[in-house]
Amino acid sequence: MKKVISFAASPQNLLKIASIDKAFKKYRKEVKHLICHAGYEEDESTSLSSFVDLDFPKTSYYFPVGYGSHAARTANTMLLVEKVLLEENPDLIILSGSQDATLAFGITASKMQIPIAHIDAGLRSFEKYNSEEINRILTDVLCEYHFVSEHSAMKNLRDEGSDSDNIHFTGNTLVDALELYWSDMEESDVLETLKLGDDNYILATFHQAENLNNEENLKEITDMIGRLSKKCKVVWLLPGYTHRKFIKENRYKDLPSGILLTGPLPYIDFLALMHNAEAVITDSEGIQEETTYLSVQCITVKKYTERIVTMDVGTNQLVGFDFEKAEKAAEDVLKGILKPGRIPEMWDGKAAKRIVEILIEEMEQEE
C-alpha cells in the first residue's frame, strides 16, 4: 500500500486538502492518506476556531509554528517535519499554499528524496521581495508534479523552465470545497442573526499586516467604510486580534451607525455573508477566488495579486492601496455598474478528483 501525506499551513488550505482526502477515499485499499496541518496556535482547535462548522477529516499531525521570524518559523517546522517523515516514510507529499511552513515541508521532503506535488502551483504576483512569492517560487522548484488552477500559472511555470509533462491543469480545489458546502451556505441564518434582513450591504474584511498594523492605513480604511456606510450598510468583519483591540480601545464608539462590526464568523456563515453582499472589499487572496465563484463583486486593496484569473475572467478589481479608488469602485457597484465576470475554466468542483487520478496513475507506473 502506498502512503501519501498532504500538508496545509492555513485553515483555508486545509479546506483544499479536505477535497483531496475525499477524492482519495475511492482508493483507500491502495493508498493510505494522512494529513498534516500547521498553525500559529498551540492548540489545533483554536487555530480552526472559525471552521468548527465544517466536517474536516481527521489530521494525523499538527505543528504549531509560532509567531517568530521567517527563518525561525521555517527552521522549527523543518525539524518537526523531519520527525514525521522519518516515522511515516511516505511515497508522496502533497503541498498546498505559500506559507513558510509549506516551503519548510517541501525542503525537508526534497532532501529526503520524497516526490512532491503542489496543488497551488504556478501562481505568481511578481512582487519580488514578498515572502509568500518567494515561497511559491521555491516550492514549485522542489516539486515533481505541478497542479494549476488557471492558465497564467501554466505559463509562469513554463517560462521558469518547468517540464511541461509535469504541469497539469486540473482546476481549483477550493471550488471543490465551495461545491461541497453550497447547500449549507444557502441554509445559513447569518443574515437573521446579524439583523440584516433584506437590506443591501457591503462586506469589508481585511487581514494583511500592512493594513491592520499600520495606523495610517487602518484610519483610511475606517474613514472609507464610514463614508460608504452613509450610502449602504457595511458589515466590517475583523480578524480576532484586531476585533479584540477595537473592543479594548473602545473604537466601537467612534464608528457611524451604518457599520456593523463583527469578529470572525463560522466559515459557512462567512460564505453566506459574501454570497449575499453587493460587494466585498478585501485584501485576502482566497476571497478573490471565492467571490469569483460566487459571482460577487470583489474590490481588492492590494498592489499585486497572484490570482490573475479572478481579474481577467472573474469579478475581481485590483485597486492597489488606493482607498479612494476602492470607495469609488464600491459606489459604482451600488449604482449598478458591475464588472462582468464568469466562473473560470475547470472551476467545476472536480479538481481534487483529477489530481488524485493523475497521482494514482503515476504511483502505479513507479511500481
Image (tube, rainbow, N blue to C red):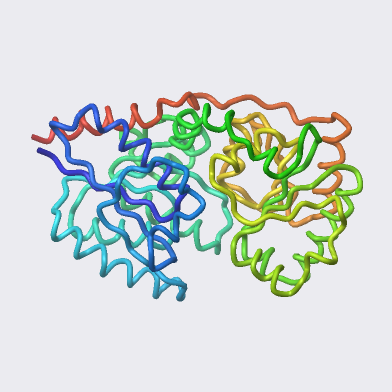
Quarter in which the C terminus is drawn: top left
State the residue at coordinates (45%, 54%). Answer: 48
State the residue at coordinates (62%, 30%). Answer: 294
The percent position of residue 210, horizontal first and vertical second, equals 66, 65
Q: Left of 109 or right of it: where is 225?
A: right
The answer to which image quadrant residue 70 occupies is bottom left
Quarter in which the N terminus is drawn: top left
Closer-to-camera residue (287/200): 200
The percent position of residue 223, horizontal first and vertical second, equals 85, 60
State the residue at coordinates (34%, 62%). Answer: 104
Q: Is residue 234 above or below residue 356?
A: below
Q: How many marks?
A: 0
The percent position of residue 308, horizontal first and vertical second, equals 59, 39
State the residue at coordinates (20%, 60%). Answer: 84
Q: Left of 197 or right of it: where is 336?
A: right
Closer-to-camera residue (238/328): 238
Q: Left of 242 or right of it: where is 80?
A: left
